[in-house]
Image (cartoon, rainbow, N blue to C red):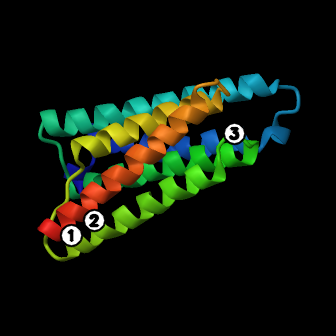
Amino acid sequence: MGGNINIPNILAFIRLLIAPLMFMLLVNRDLFPSVHPSWLDFWAAFLFVLASITDFFDGYIAREFDQITQLGKILDPLADKMLTLAGFLGLLVLGRADPWAVYLILTREFFITGLRVAAVSEGRNIAASFLGKIKTIVQMVAIGFLIMDWSLGRPLLWLAVAITLYSGYEYIKEYIRK
């Protein structure tokens, strides 16, 4: 158990904690009646960016310092999914994200997660691809822009949809190939 307590896993756990806090700032605005909504957007975006940075560093540290653990292999993608789910659902509540875009992205995420679990149960590993990493970055940038209600948010969301679906196709192709 002690080998599972390392910096990458702590960073992933921090992401797990940030996701519901960010979600609360997006959807429970009535809890903060004296705070202007733009400040709630700012703090939600700040938390999202902070969590996104932990995603980069937990992966970098785990690989660079050979701190990859079984717990980390589960915790990291779970934290990523919880963060993007919190962001997309919050944006849907605020009316800032197209429901079809969110549906397509989340469907792909759940499907590929299931595919990866199936592969692991068969003793195979389908690691995150370079395109999968680009997909995550574009999704995170789109979510950040949409939280701040910046004009490029919607086009970035549809770019994220395209990359997300194509990277899903690549995962399926890799699964079939192996």
Q: Is residue 45 left or right of residue 123?
A: right
Q: Secondary structure at mark 3?
A: loop
Q: Residue at x 85, y 40 (%)?
A: 30
- Residue displayed at 66% across by 23% down: 42
Q: Which residue is mark 1?
A: 120
Q: Residues within 10 Å of mark 1 (few under 14, many from 20)?
A: few
> Is disc 1 in contact with disc 2, using a CB cutoff of under 8 Å?
yes
Give the percent coordinates (x, y) of residue 28. 77, 44
Residue that label 2 marks: 116
Quadrant housing the C terminus = bottom left
Q: Residue at x 26, y 64 (%)?
A: 172
Q: Within 10 Å of the Cα at label 2, are there few (<14), some (14-19), or many (20+) other Cα atoms?
A: many
Task: Give the amino acid type for the residue marked by disc 2 in the picture.
Answer: Arg
Q: Earlier in the sequence, mark 1 or mark 3?
A: 3
Q: Nearer the viewer, residue 10 or 19?
A: 19
Image coordinates of residue 59 in percent, x first then y, are 26, 38
Say which amino acid is labelled 3: Arg
Q: Which mark is residue 96?
A: 3
